């Protein structure tokens, strides 16, 4: 069996893997990416957040992505019973990027992979990791290509950005159940011929369908719009028929959706994603680090997936560089605790969304501009800014704010 020697083996050619590979490569190390699938391939997670732009910029990807002409995204709009809450990233509290993109992920991910290849990092598609043996920090990974040919890759470090594949967690029994409530998404890409500028293609729109059930609308620059319903699996069991029949019935049940999307052409058969939440006992070990969805994927509601993927890889890559240069790295403090700050902040917002707490905040009258800007920063992905009280106190701040709004409105009602 042939054995190849590299400094860093990256598993997965998605945003997590390519960001990490680029940053490590730029530091002068020999990097190789192995990817189980053939690109381009479909994946969900189409609405990015401004914070991920910092990682894309450091990886050297922004120019290549800009050339693709993807739909720029300037904010997020929430709709419930005719009321609208509009967040503009330009108004956010935390300094940083105030725009990003909405992307068909097949094209976006292939663009990142192509760019890192052009930088000099080989990407081997349709290559599956079958075994990893660690000897201290060093490792030997056995991979098998689509023709059944096996190769060994000796590496000084492994970055696992394998996403839902969860290569190292599965091989070394690191997986553990997420605390997130299981949910289901039924979604499709539509040929959106009735779209107009009034529909604000430069933002994601999230519509509250009923308590615990919401709809995403993500317009792309190519005239396709991603449309999905998300809720408890029991919600979907009320409906009979094929996935397409169920989805078209749900579209017809919403007046706005019925006008814009009823009878619309679907670009592919509706797809289902459920029980997506997973996590691991630890995000690092002697000779490896987990990044992206391999760490923890929460929920699609606040589009946190690609941001957590790219920021975790940006952070991990710089720590790996230090490690390979002989420095001491406190992986627990500098990586695990850091990433969990972001994960747990998003988790508080996800939980508050499904509890209805954020409904009270988002659709309140006379919102405080400062508070709104601070919450906007979280929605932009700046979940590591501890100067923001709605990040630092994420476990309690939202509930306190909702109670204050409710009390204020009760007092106002009594006076009237």
Image (spheres, rainbow, N blue to C red):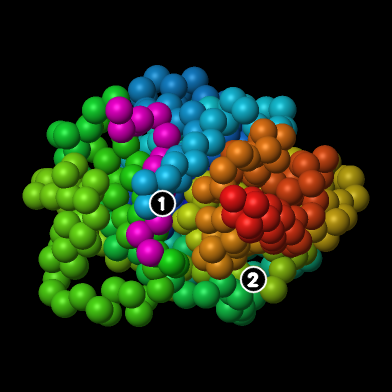
**On screen, residue 220 above or below 352:** above
Q: Secondary structure at mark 2?
A: strand
Give the residue number, with chain letter if any, for mark 2. 280
Residue 371, numbered circle: none
In the depicted view, which residue is nearer to us: 83 or 131? 83
Where's residue 177, x and y in %? Answer: 58, 78
Quadrant hosting residue 36: bottom left
The stretch drawn in magenta includes residue 208:
yes
Q: Which residues are magenta?
A: 198-210
Q: Earlier in the sequence, mark 2 or mark 1?
A: 1
Determine the CA span between mark 2 and mark 1.
35 Å
Q: Residue at x 50, y 61 (%)?
A: 299
Looking at the picture, does residue 98 appear above or below residue 336? above
**Residue located at (29% from left, 25% from top):** 197
Q: Farthest front residue?
A: 416
Q: Is residue 326 left or right of residue 179?
A: right
Q: Does the magenta portion include 133?
A: no
State the residue lying farthest toward the right. 328
Residue 80 is labelled as: 1
x and y percent of residue 29 in the render? 68, 37
Residue 61 in view: no
For image coordinates 57% across by 31% down, the residue present is 89
Q: Picture coordinates of residue 59 (x, y %)?
A: 60, 31
Q: Residues within 10 Å of mark 2 (few under 14, many from 20)?
A: many
Residue at left 13%, top 66%? Answer: 245
> Picture coordinates of residue 210 (x, y %)?
38, 64
In this rendering, is residue 293 above or below 307?
A: below
């Amino acid at each position: 069996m042939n054995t190849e020697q590299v400094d860093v083996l990256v598993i997965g050619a998605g945003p997590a893997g390519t960001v990490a590979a680029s940053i490590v490569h730029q530091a002068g190390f020999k990097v190789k990416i192995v990817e189980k699938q053939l690109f381009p391939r479909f994946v969900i997670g189409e609405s990015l957040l401004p914070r991920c732009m910092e990682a894309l910029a450091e990886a050297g990807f922004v120019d290549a992505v800009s050339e693709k002409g993807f739909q720029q995204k300037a904010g997020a709009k929430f709709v419930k019973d005719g009321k609208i809450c509009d967040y503009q990233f330009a108004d956010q509290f935390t300094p940083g990027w105030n725009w990003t993109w909405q992307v068909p992920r097949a094209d976006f991910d292939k663009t990142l992979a192509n760019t890192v290849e052009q930088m000099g990092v080989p990407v081997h598609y349709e290559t599956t990791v079958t075994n990893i043996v660690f000897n201290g920090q060093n490792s030997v990974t056995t991979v098998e290509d689509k023709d059944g040919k096996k190769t060994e890759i000796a590496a000084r470090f492994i970055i696992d950005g394998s996403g839902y594949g969860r290569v190292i967690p599965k091989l070394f029994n690191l997986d553990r159940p997420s605390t997130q409530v299981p949910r289901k998404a039924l979604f499709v890409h539509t040929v959106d011929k009735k779209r107009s500028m009034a529909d604000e293609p430069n933002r994601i729109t999230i519509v509250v369908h009923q308590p615990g059930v919401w709809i995403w609308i993500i317009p792309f620059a190519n005239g396709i719009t991603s449309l999905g319903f998300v809720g408890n699996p029991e919600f979907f069991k009320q409906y009979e028929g094929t996935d397409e029949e169920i989805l078209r019935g749900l579209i017809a049940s919403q007046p706005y959706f019925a006008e814009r999307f009823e009878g619309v052409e679907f670009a592919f058969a509706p797809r289902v994603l459920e029980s997506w939440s997973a996590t691991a006992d630890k995000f690092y070990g002697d000779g490896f680090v987990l990044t992206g969805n391999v760490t923890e994927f929460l929920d699609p509601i606040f589009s946190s997936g690609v941001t957590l993927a790219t920021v975790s890889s940006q952070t991990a890559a710089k720590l790996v560089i230090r490690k390979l240069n002989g420095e001491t790295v406190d992986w627990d403090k500098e990586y695990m605790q850091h990433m969990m700050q972001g994960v747990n902040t998003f988790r508080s917002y996800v939980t508050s969304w499904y509890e209805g707490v954020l409904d009270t905040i988002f659709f309140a009258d006379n919102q405080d501009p400062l508070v709104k800007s601070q919450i906007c920063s979280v929605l932009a992905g700046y979940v590591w800014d501890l100067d923001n009280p709605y990040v630092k106190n994420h476990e309690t701040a939202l509930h306190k704010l909702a109670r204050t709004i409710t009390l204020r409105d009760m007092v106002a009602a009594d006076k009237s």
